[in-house]
Amino acid sequence: MKAIVVREFGPAEVMKLEEVPNPSPGPGQLLVRVRAVGVNPVEVYVRSGAYARKPSLPYTPGTDVAGIVEAMGPDVTRANNGDRVYAHGTAAGYGGYAERTVCDQSQVHPLPARLSFAQGAAVGVPYGTAWRALFVRAQARPGETVLIHGASGGVGIAATQIARAYGLRVIGTAGTDKGVTLVREQGAHEVLNHRDADYMARIMPLTGSRGVDVILEMLANVNLDRDLEVLAPGGRVVVVGNRGRVEIDPRKIMSKDGTVLGMTMFSATAEELRAIHAALVAGLENGTLNPVIGRELPLAQAVQAHGAVMEAGAFGKIVLIPT
């Protein structure tokens, strides 16, 4: 089979499409024929060697796969051959940028027939991150107001849909007119273009001068200090993404009894993941959650996909399609 293989950390060009042996599932594992795999910014950081957690070389990137169960190892109780599934990870030593991969059964969940495989590949990291940020880290409650920066990207769309369904008032931002329209279509009550110089100044009036209870911050090095100015009393900022250092005024946190929280899916416990994906599967089944695909690229264009996922003006999820 074909798979993307990384033999050294570095620029996107270190990813090569190679012929590799077909994998086999072990006890409690499933062999999944990959029909689509999501591309996430964290995979760019890992591949570059800049991330704190690095896999052993060589490795195949990718965790968010969707496809069909082709084979099962002993002791599998959660799936059957031929099932349509999505996975929020792959078994140790395997990756999703491939025609087939191996997943532990705890990583695999049913993909409702109403969704495409590309949509299934947009669930794992984006929707898991959004849920964990909102409800595990920020402890968001119905009736609160949430500000979602970059709401037209994969995590932002997921957070918008989840927050709206849960009864929060949603203010989203995007960087293009197309993105603003998309965020509004996903259920945001108010949408601001973050390329407008005064967009942050418009947030307090939208909340009756009270401020926002929860902020999901996708680019903390740019926004964090300004976020603290629009927090409501007891407000929480969850840092989901960051690309550099930032200077803040701690008095802005002190005066609001505010909290700044870090967030990574690598820290999620097995118990959290079970709860998160039980909720996500329910939303996928009942139509509350609908992943939006921005671009589909062939697996051979993984290099281009890693460039695209880091571009400004995100619009939906980028997925790779094995041939």
Image: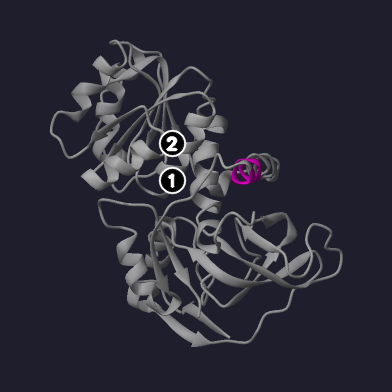
The main secondary structure of the magenta stretch is helix
- Separation (CA) of disc 2 from disc 1: 9 Å
Q: Is residue 101 above or below residue 291?
A: below
Query: Dot 2, crowdedness within 10 Å: few (<14), some or many (≥20)?
Result: many
Q: Is residue 291 left or right of residue 86?
A: left
Give the image location of residue 273, x and y in percent: 65, 44
Q: Which residue is mark 1?
A: 155
Which span of residues is magenta-colored? 280-285
Foreground: disc 2 or disc 1: 2
Q: Is residue 313 above or below residue 137?
A: below
Instruction: Give residue 246's mark.
Output: none
Residue 74 sits in quarter: bottom right
Which residue type does callout 2 highlight? Thr
The mark nearer the N terminus, 2 or 1, is: 1
Give the image location of residue 217, x and y in percent: 36, 36
Q: Which residue is mark 2?
A: 160
Q: Residue at x 36, y 13 (%)?
A: 256
Question: Within the magenta stretch, is there residue 281?
Answer: yes
Question: Within the magenta stretch, is there residue 237?
Answer: no
Position of the N terminus, as image quadrant, is bottom right
- Residue 23 seen anywhere in this rendered image of the structure: yes
Q: Residue at x 27, y 40 (%)?
A: 180
- Residue 245 seen anywhere in this rendered image of the structure: no
Q: Is residue 312 left or right of residue 50?
A: left
Give the image location of residue 156, x and y in percent: 40, 42
Give the image location of residue 141, x and y in percent: 53, 21
Which residue type does callout 1 highlight? Val
Q: Which residue is situated farthest in the left direction here?
A: 197
Query: Dot 1, crowdedness within 10 Å: few (<14), some or many (≥20)?
Result: many
